[in-house]
Image (tube, rainbow, N blue to C red):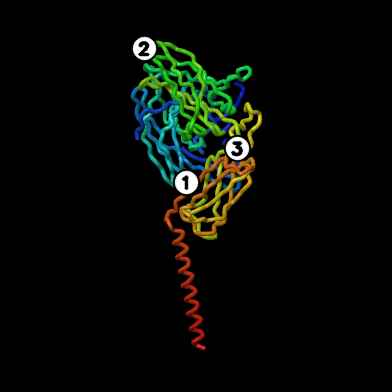
Amino acid sequence: MGTTPLRLFRYISVAALLVVGGVVHAQTTSVAAPTHVSRTPITPLRSSSGAVGVVGAPVVLATVNIQNARVVSQADHTLSISFDISNRTGVQPSVRYSVQLVGVGTSTTHVVFADEYVFPDTVSLDEHTSVHKDIVYTAPRGLMGRFEVYIQAESDTGFPLATADAGRATFATAVSGVGIAANTCYLTVQGEKGSPKYTLQQGVDIASTEQLLLHCSATNYSGASVALTPQYETRYRSVYGDSVAQTGGDASPIVLAPHETKQFSLVLPKASEPQAYDVLFSLVSGNSTSNTIAVLYVLQGSSATIQNIGLDKSGYPSGDTAVVSFFWSPSADGSPHSRLGTSSPSATTAVITLQSGTTVCATPVTQPLTKNPLVRASLPVLAACANPQVTIKLLADDGTVLAAGGLMRTSATGNGLLLVEIVGALVLLLIMGGALVSVKRRADKK
């Protein structure tokens, strides 16, 4: 299609950070009725690990690991899978995980994502903690063949954290139902000269006045006609993101005769704010739902994203220095091959605050943003700061807030910092009292 996929560009950006800036390091309840996401072919650049640091001065942003991943059992297209998600350093909130099916073929350099399901629950990991997961995943009923099963963890902004191989699954036969053939799908922008085609995960950028068209083919595996209703869900930044408001989207039913394969085209819905989004698309008929297609696109305009935040300690005494680090990305339409041609203006400054409840622990810091995606700031602590909470806002030149995020760490002893200061004050008073007694005794002897 002639354009580097945005999702691939994201991974390249992370990989570049690892080489130039240091290291991202990580190792390696039953949920009902999953929504399935079929990805277009890409070559994965992520390893099984993900912690970020800076040469000479490590700044850890993520040390999430997926361990002991395995397919415990299989019944037709349903897999029971278990694994552990652990975290070594700092706090990692809003961790989301998915099951990915990758087709097993003869090529070792080109793979096909056959399906992905992002589970709805969110895991929050404190320092040196681990969470065990027993999950049930049902693959699309139209899949047949051998597949590698992976567990993938990312933040709710799509920041890659960890990947683990859980084994293989073989689906001997396809079961009746409706399937969307992901390898037939492509995108066009309505009215664009030459009608160029874009892949589903290319991250094509469109203006708010433009319409994005999805073209696919679907097959009815059953012996009865079906009327299929398009279903959409828009998620922030990636399939791991929160659901956001959307407008538009064709709602006309698609009718398939028994065992018929038909091509269709429809207009996708759009979000309202400039940013990258994933639209999850499926076809529904009664209680039957097809596999889901994920479409990544960018709404042109100024934006910014705080990918991940790190705080070096879980509490600070007065006089200490808090080190805040975060990974950010500028306007989402800044891909080297965007239709816009140039990136929209993005954030230029970051405003960082540190609090403990309602207590302001440090004077807010305003720091200019450079092209370096990894930012580090030092905040002199003015008051004891147990359970510190850092808040970051990324501002445009005119003061508009383009992104905001926060992180709270829980002190191991709750109000331990206050206790330390109180004990310190008592010790100081005792020393001073002892000194006064000694001086008085010497005076009395004279």
Residue type highlighted by circle 2: Ala
Labels 2 & 1 near each other (Cβ < 8 A)? no
Tell me the distance, in whole angstroms, between the alpha carbons under discs 3 and 2: 50 Å
Name which quarter of the figure residue 282 lies in: top left
Q: Which residue is mark 3?
A: 330
Q: Position of residue 123 (x, y in %)?
A: 42, 40
Q: Give the side of residue 261 with respect to residue 79, left or right.
A: right
Of labels 2 and 1, earlier in sequence is 1
Q: Give the side of residue 245 with respect to residue 12, left or right.
A: left
Of labels 3 and 1, earlier in sequence is 1
Classify mark 1: helix, strand or loop. Answer: loop
Q: Nearer the viewer, residue 435 or 379?
A: 379
The residue under the point 36% across, 35% down is: 134
* Badge 3 density bin: few <14, some 14–19, many ≥20, Cα 10 Å: many
Q: Which residue is mark 2?
A: 224
Tell me the distance, in whole angstroms, between the alpha carbons under discs 3 and 1: 24 Å
Q: Nearer the viewer, residue 277 or 123?
A: 277
User: Of all residues shown, which one is farthest toward the right?
Assistant: 342
